[in-house]
Structure formats: structure tokens, C-alpha cells
Amino acid sequence: MKDTRVRINQAIRAPELRVIGADGNNVGVITLAEAVALAAEAGVDLIEISPAAVPPVAKIMDFGKYQYELQKKQREMKSKSHTTETKSVQVKIGTGEHDLMLKAKRVAEWLTEGHRVKIDLFLWGRYKYMEFGFLKERLERFIKLVPTDYKIAEEIKKSPKGLSATIEREAKK
């Protein structure tokens, strides 16, 4: 198991360190005792930044400031990452034109947010045994109602509920 805690001052185990000064300049490779003395002289801490490097890299700076900068970087990375979800919309053979338009508008909103959308043509009872070409045309007609640019990620195919297709946002050029 890897230890992820940051070592500071006397907790650093390496006998020699490559030290970066409080002003950001490279001090050079010095012993641990000399580095701790430099940090104490500056009134701040010696923080091991890169323990895997040879020799390990340490920086002379305030530990609270270092933790704040790490948290700031993590928040920034988290805000930049965007998880895509597969949303689902269900239409039926008898769904009215206005309702189809509303559902298509909702699908367009999801696509602009960057989500994939799975569209199910829900079939029940006798509808399950209708001609495949007719059912496929009904689903294609709904997909054409979507007002934004999209590409078909998964072609129309039979599913346990009826027919389904997946669409996603068109890649920007």
C-alpha cells in the first residue's frame, strides 16, 4: 500500500534533497539537515514535493499555503472534468405530434449538455408483431424531429422494450 501523505521537515527520510527555495529558485542538492536549517531560517517548512525523484525534490514554503494550492488544483481539475450520462426517452406508436415535439426538444437539451440519449420506441401487445420496416420508420421520424446536430452512436435495433437507437452530440469541427 502506497503512503500518500506529504512529508515535511524532520519526517523526510532522504539524506540528500534537491531543494527549491522560498523564492522559487533552485538551491541545489543539499543534505536534509542543511535544508531544514534553511527552512527554519526562512520561518517556513521544508515540504517533500516529489519523493519518487532521484534525489527527492523538496520545496521551502508554508505548509498551509502548499495545502491550499493542492486543493485549488484539485477543485479546478474537478470542475473541468465532465461525466457524460446516457439519458433515456421513450416514445410510443400512438404518441401525438405535439408530445413528440416536446420530447425532441428535451432530447436536444440533453445533447447540448453533452449527454448521450437512448431513444426507445416502446411496443406492447400486438404492436410487437408489426412489420420491422414500419416500426423503424416511426423511430426514424422521431429522431429527425430533434432540432440540434447529432450523430447516431448505435443504429436502430430490436430491444426488449421494442426498438431503440442511441444518439450523441455531433463533434465540433
Image: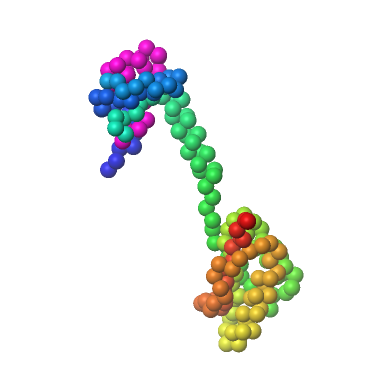
Residue 18 shown left or right of residue 90 in the figure = left
On the question of residue 52 being in view, the answer is: yes
Quadrant including the C terminus:
bottom right
Q: Which of 150 and 3 is in front in this view?
A: 150
Q: Position of residue 164 (x, y in %)?
A: 57, 73
State the residue lying farthest toward the right. 98
Residue at 45% from the left image edge and 33% from the top image edge? 70
Q: Position of residue 48 (x, y in %)?
A: 34, 28
Residue at 29% from the left image edge and 29% from the top image edge? 55
Residue at 61% from the left image edge and 66% from the top image edge? 151
Residue 40 in magenta stretch: yes
Q: Where is residue 18 in the image (x, y as percent from the top left)?
A: 33, 25
Residue 136 shown left or right of residue 56 in the figure = right
61 to 51, vertically: above or below? above
Quadrant including the N terminus:
top left
50 to 152, vertically: above or below? above
Q: Nearer the viewer, residue 124 or 120?
A: 120
The colour style of the image is rainbow
Q: Quadrant of residue 106?
A: bottom right
7 to 109, vertically: above or below? above
Q: Quadrant of residue 135?
A: bottom right
Residue at 59% from the left image edge and 56% from the top image edge? 114
Residue 25 in magenta stretch: no
Q: Quadrant of residue 116?
A: bottom right
Residue 117 shown left or right of residue 146 in the figure = left
On the question of residue 45 being in view, the answer is: no
Q: How many labels does the image show?
A: 0
Q: What stretch is highlighted in magenta?
A: 32-52
Q: Where is residue 73 in the image (x, y as percent from the top left)?
A: 49, 36
Q: Nearer the viewer, residue 149 or 7?
A: 149
